[in-house]
Image (cartoon, rainbow, N blue to C red):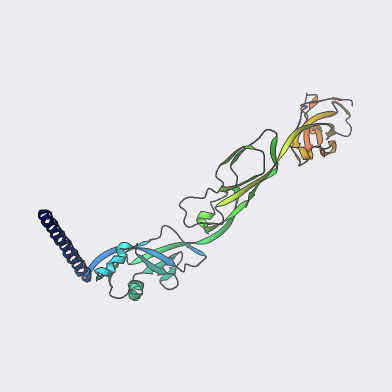
Amino acid sequence: MIKKLKTSISKSVANKRIHVFFLFLTLAFTILIFTKLSKEYTNTIVFDINKINVPPEHVILNDSNSKLEITLKTHGFKWFKYYLFNPKITVDFNKDVDLNKRTYIWSKSKVFLYEKAHFGEQVSLLNISPDTLLFKYDVNLVKKVPVVLHSNIEFNQGYDVYGNYNVTPDSIEIIGPHVLVSKIKSIKTEDIKLTNIKSNVKESIKLILPENENNLIFSNASVTLSASVKKFTEGALKIPVTLTNVPKNTTLKYFPKEVNVTYYTSLEDFKSIANNDFIVICDYSKAVSGQSFLTPELLKFPDRVKNAKVNQQRIEFIILK
């Protein structure tokens, strides 16, 4: 029992010595760090440019200089923020630059003039490289371009789109440098594929916007595709054939005088489709010399039908006089 007690006391003393050792080691390290950080150091750091108050009618082009190498002298504590965060220096286009044709010119004298405003107290600015920055700009152009739908939509048997596909908005505005915006004629949607559709369509589709064009602003990044879908059926009607452009002194006899026209329409419109909704003609001025037939053309059909076609390919004729 006494032996176990001695062993326990020995372990406790040893643990206390280890704790004390690490405590002193931590204190020594902390003192060392504070000593180092209290000293002044000189170093060169790369600063990004933060552009503010650029006139709204101008856009700074990407090929402009965007970084500065700045040499500073300050104590270690101040250096922390430069190493922990991406350092930036602000260029105010209201007061820090001069305008020369299509270029804004910035010089390092502006920074030395407002040294404390940029870096604060206890920081010495030693050098800036390069000593001049050129910001090329272009005049903004606002242009409206159409949206081009890329779709592959398959309907369930007996169903189809009623009317047209609607893309909202059907065009978007692009704002940016004239040299870039003027080249854009349209904006395409991402491909959308829908199958076995038998109800109304309403889908959001992303636009394919130009990549790596930070100078461009787009009014929309996506559009909405909508369509009314109804049950469809096929219909057929006999439509009279009308001859056109027959010379006044010419009399023709032709056959057949009626042709079969087939069409596709919604069930709800089927009963409203009538013969007088269609016009089929044969244009005599298109007759080929030596041939005794004309080709019938479907000149008119209602908006409520689709895939309307004349099934008769030839109208035979003879000249009576």
Where is residue 263? Give x, y as percent.
Answer: 76, 34
Q: Say which of 5 and 91 sits in front.
A: 5
Q: Looking at the picture, does residue 38 appear above or below residue 197?
A: below
Q: Say which of 103 and 116 sits in front.
A: 116
Q: Say which of 128 and 317 sits in front.
A: 128
Give the residue drawn at x 59%, y 54%.
172
Q: Looking at the picture, does residue 14 appear above or below residue 282?
A: below
Where is residue 69? Give x, y as percent.
Answer: 30, 63
Question: Which of the image's four quarters has the N terminus?
Answer: bottom left
Q: Is residue 15 left or right of residue 263?
A: left
Give the residue drawn at x 82%, y 29%.
259
Give the residue drawn at x 17%, y 61%.
19
Q: Is residue 163 left or right of residue 270?
A: left
Give the residue drawn at x 65%, y 47%.
226
Question: Which of the image's four quarters has the C terminus?
Answer: top right
Q: Is residue 82 left or right of residue 158?
A: left
Residue furthest to the front: 1
Where is residue 129? Give x, y as percent.
Answer: 30, 65
Residue 19 visible in the displayed image: yes
Q: Looking at the picture, does residue 7 appear above or below residue 321?
A: below
Where is residue 306? Give x, y as percent.
Answer: 73, 37
Residue 307 visible in the displayed image: no
Q: How many marks?
A: 0
Quadrant assignment, res 80? bottom left
